[in-house]
Amino acid sequence: MRKGLLTLVVTGLLAGSTGMASAGENGVVWTDAGPIRGTVATDHQLYQGIPFAAPPVGELRWRSPQPVQPWSAVRDATKPGGACAQTNGGVAATDNEDCLYLNVTTPSRHGRKPVMVYLHGGGNSYLTAGGINGARIATQGDVVVVTTNFRLGFFGFLGHPGLPNSGAYGIEDQQAALRWVQRNAAAFGGDPGNVTVFGESGGAFDVCAQLAAPGSRGLFHRAIAQSGGCSITWPANGVVHGFPASSPWIAKAKAEADGVALATQLGCSTVDCLRALPASAFTAIERGPTPVVVGNKVLPIHPAEALAQGRFNHVPVIWGNTRDEARLTAGLIPPPFDYHGLLVQAFGDGKAALVEAEYPAGRYGSDRLAYAAALTDGVWVCAQLADDRLLARRVPTYGYEFADRTAPSGFFKDMLPPGFPAGAFHSSELPYLFDTPLFDLNASQRTLSDQMISYWTRFARTGNPNGHGLPYWPKNTVQSLAPDAIRQVDAYQEHNCGFWAGL
């Protein structure tokens, strides 16, 4: 189970935090709640552990985020706030609920700069913003980078009939962080009128949620979803081995029924009883990825339906995947590897035979690689392309596929079967955007990294990723991103989406 969860862990590869610089020469910046002192480096400034909402503890557990208590003395902002409560499926188990803090990296150059707000991965169950190093994007792209925590798991997404409009507190936390950006971006050299929200995997699901959430209107002006959108669902074992079929979204009625069942399991019949329990009562329960409740005030309708109906925040988008999303899912399954049995668990007897015929092991070189290709196409890419088609009806839409099949696999290399190629696995693009320990890039990969950062930050600045010296990226196409091979591809055909639509 632990190795299976590592497939989810990689969705938010953490970059090592380093000491840096500040928007005031002495490292002090005045926020709307009080002054903070960050760390000053030669080319950028870093401010960490800035509270953007009151600690959601005690009576504030399972309530919308509340205003932070102002302070007058200069507050130390040289270390990140603690991770939000989570099980040990992520970086490390913690019962900490006082976690609503964000971090700001800003270049030393003066001027009003685009702001990029990053939502970390981890399936809304794991990880933290604390170690994500945004210095490379900030300095190379001349943008202000904000990374933020938000409540996870049961604390962020519990549905219960005793909690009206419950089930999306984590999404509300992100909105509170975006409102903080509106009030405070200018103090860090940022432009509150030019904000991009971007995220990977679970963070990309949350980008979709922000796109669909009426309460997020006007809080951001562009959106980037990396490996996770609105239309995705997955079968048993389809994202994390050992977990059942699911989706990033859950209907309110089902979520409330699950919440009542959880309360009964924990010996409670009221919300007050649940609030009185220690955080450890909830972090002891491993649930895998956590779905966001829809049908409440935060997300009145399913996000995919919001796209179909045009009922979403109309901003330019970049929406894409990695070429081999499911290689880690397949590679981390312990032996013996039963390809046919896994397909039966995922799709049922009849459809399993069709999938196996369409993805024969002989064509891909092994059972694991065939299974990885089937999940990459059927779970990830074709769903993202479905989003692309809906989005392109109403907003500028740029699709991409990160396709460096030699991307560094870091610590995953020793966890995969001997000789198993990780390829362009889920989250493998993150070291090309953030400085990430143990995932070192060679010279050609560093060039691709420079190009990707230019695309991402040019898009943040103008709503169009194209710029001088970059290979042209037309709207409504999928740009394949690989060293020395940036080009448009027919991702629908490449990923066999006609077959999956028929299935």
Image: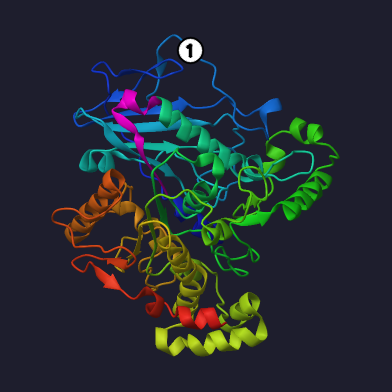
User: In the orientation shown, which residue stands out farthest toward the top?
Assistant: 72
Residue 251: percent from left, percent from top: 69, 55
Find residue 72 and report its image quarter: top left
Can the viewer see residue 93 in this picture?
no
Residue drawn 58% across and 29% down? 98
Residue 417: percent from left, percent from top: 44, 71
Give the quadrant of the N terminus: bottom right
Residue drawn 26% across and 50% down? 453
Q: Is residue 180 left or right of residue 30?
A: right
Give the quadrant of the C terminus: bottom right
Q: Is residue 320 left or right of residue 334?
A: left
**What's drawn in magenta, residue-wise?**
184-198
Q: Find out whether residue 193 is within the magenta segment.
A: yes
- The residue indicated by pointer 1 is 71
Can the viewer see residue 368 in this picture?
yes
Q: Report the amino acid beneath label 1.
A: Trp
Q: Nearer the viewer, residue 225 or 136?
A: 225
Say if 131 sits above or below 495 in the image: above
The majority secondary structure of the magenta stretch comes to strand
Residue 128: percent from left, percent from top: 48, 41
